Image: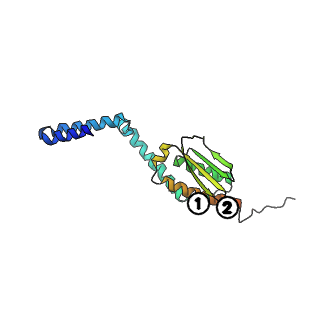
Amino acid sequence: SGVFGVLGVVAFQWPNTRGFAYLGGLTLAWLLLYTLEYDVIRRPVSTLRGQSDHRKRRSLMLALGQQMEEFLAKDPHQEAVFRSIRYWGDLAGVSRLEVRQQESTVWASGPEDQSHRMLLFRHQGWEIRWSLPEASWTLDSDVKGELLEEVSHALFERLQQLENPKVRAFRKPTP
C-alpha cells in the first residue's frame, strides 16, 4: 500500500509522469496477484472456462437442494435415499457424509479427515454429519449453510417416512 501511495503522490505532483505511475501501479498489482498465485492471473483461459462448469454445478446444487423433498420422494428404500444424498453431496463439495441413528452409524460415505469442517444436524434420534473441505466451504458460503440444513431436514423426513410407512406393501400369499 505504501508503494501505491507513493505512485499516487508522484502522479499528483508531476502530471507529466501520470501515465508511468498508472502503468507502474498496474504492473505492481499484476505482479502481486501473480506472486499470490491467483488462478485468474496465472491461467486466465482455463479459469474462465472452468467458471461456466462451476455455475452449472452450483445451479444444479441449488435447484436440487431447494426441492430435496421431491427429489428424495422417488427413492423407495434407504439405500436409494443415501445414493441420492451422496449425489447431491458431491455437487455441494461434501467430502464425507455420515448418517447416524441412536449413536450408531447407519450409513457413511467418504474418507474421514479431521481438518475438514463438520456440520451436525439432529432430529428425533437421527443425526447427520456433513464434512466439508475449506475450499468447498468458502466457495458457496453464501448459501451452503442454509442449504445443508434444508437438505438435512428433507433427509430426516424421508428416513422417518421409510421407518413408518403409511401404506404397507401388498404381497400375494405364496401357495
Q: Position of residue 56 (x, y in %)?
A: 46, 50
Hey, which residue is sitting farthest bottom in the picture? 166
Q: Amino acid at mark 2?
A: Gln
Q: CA distance from mark 1 to mark 2?
A: 11 Å
Give the numbered dot on residue 69. 1
SS at mark 1? helix
Cβ–Cβ under 8 Å for marks 1 and 2: no
State which quadrant residue 114 falls in: top right
**Quick one: label 2, few (<14), some, or many (20+) residues within 10 Å?**
few
**Taking 17 as reference, is 81 left or right?**
right
Residue at 57% from the left image edge and 58% from the top image edge: 68
**Taking 149 as reference, is 9 left or right?**
left
In the image, is residue 167 above or below residue 148? below
Q: Position of residue 63 (x, y in %)?
A: 50, 56
State which quadrant residue 159 falls in: bottom right
Q: Quadrant of the C terminus?
A: bottom right
Q: Nearer the viewer, residue 159 or 51?
A: 159
Q: Quadrant of the N terminus?
A: top left
Residue at 38% from the left image edge and 38% from the top image edge: 38
**Label 2, on which residue?**
161
Q: How is the image coloured?
A: rainbow
In the image, is residue 14 above or below residue 89? above
Q: Position of residue 135 (x, y in %)?
A: 47, 43
Q: Position of residue 86 (x, y in %)?
A: 59, 48
In the image, is residue 92 above or below residue 20? below
Hey, which residue is sitting farthest front in the picture? 2
**Quick one: label 1, few (<14), some, or many (20+) residues within 10 Å?**
some
Q: Amino acid at mark 1?
A: Glu
